[in-house]
Every structure is written in C-alpha cells, then in structure tokens.
Amino acid sequence: MHEMALMGDILNIIQNDIQKRNLSKVTKIELIVGDISNALPDALEMAFSIYKTQSISFLDKETTLVIHREKALAKCYICSEEYVPDQKLAICPSCKIPSGNLISGETFKVYSYEGCS
Ligand SMILES: [Zn+2]
C-alpha cells in the first residue's frame, strides 16, 4: 500500500509548514486526488487513520481528512474533443489513437489545512 508513503509525505510537508507558522495542532487536512493519480482515496483514508494512532504530535483523534476528487479529462489535439480517459494513454474516442493531452485527473496535493497553536 504505497498510500502509506504518500500520506507520510503529506504529513511531512504539513509538519514543516506548521513549524514555520508556529502552529502545534492540525484540525483538518484537505487533499485533491485525481481520478487517475496513483493514489486511492480509500487507502489514503486508511493510511491516515493508521498515522493518527502513531502519536504524531500535531495529529489527534479529532483531526479530519477531506479528499476532493478531481475528474480525469483529456482533450484530443487532433479533433479537440474532450473526453474522460480511462487510463493515462488517453485514446481519443473519435480518432482512436492516443492523441489526448490530459487536462486534469493526475493531481495529488494538499489543497489546504487548518491548524491552531
Ligand atoms: Zn480526436
């Protein structure tokens, strides 16, 4: 489950940031996870609940994780059709060749977090 590592990276980023802002607790973390990013939301939730049990100083039982999904969308550079790709190859349904440029869906990032001192 590589979401454990991904969630660990997210928590490291947040930890660095709260230190700069003199915060000691994080109450809410919001992520954006694209439909064809390499992260599965359910697994991220599970990883987060495991991290919450590992006495990380800025997390407690009340800290919530909110995951916003980003839909996958590709646009064909030949016929300009926009469509939902089912994989990163993004084959255009009209041209039948992988002529699509991904517009969205690969995002994996922290959207925001809320903390207190
Ligand atoms: Zn096309």
Image (cartoon, rainbow, N blue to C red):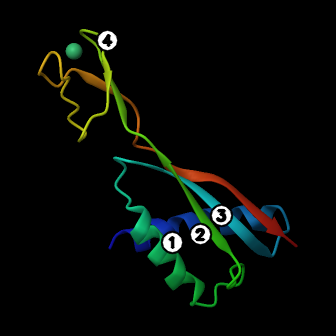
Which residue is depicted at the point 70% across and 67% down?
Answer: 28
In the image, 9 versus 96, the foreground residue is 96
- Of tags 1 and 3, the one toward the viewer is 3
The residue tagged 2 is 11
Helix, strand or loop status at disc 3: strand
**Sequence-earlier tag: 4 or 2:** 2
Measure the C-alpha gap from mark 3 to mark 2.
Answer: 9 Å
Count of number-bearing discs: 4
Helix, strand or loop status at disc 4: loop
Helix, strand or loop status at disc 1: helix
Label number found at residue 29 = 3
**Sequence-earlier tag: 3 or 2:** 2
Which residue is depicted at the point 26% across and 23% down?
Answer: 100
Left or right: 93 with respect to 102?
left
Label number found at residue 8 = 1
In the image, 117 versus 68, the foreground residue is 68
- Under mark 3, the amino acid is Ile
**Sequence-earlier tag: 1 or 3:** 1
Measure the C-alpha gap from mark 1 to mark 4.
Answer: 39 Å
The residue tagged 4 is 80
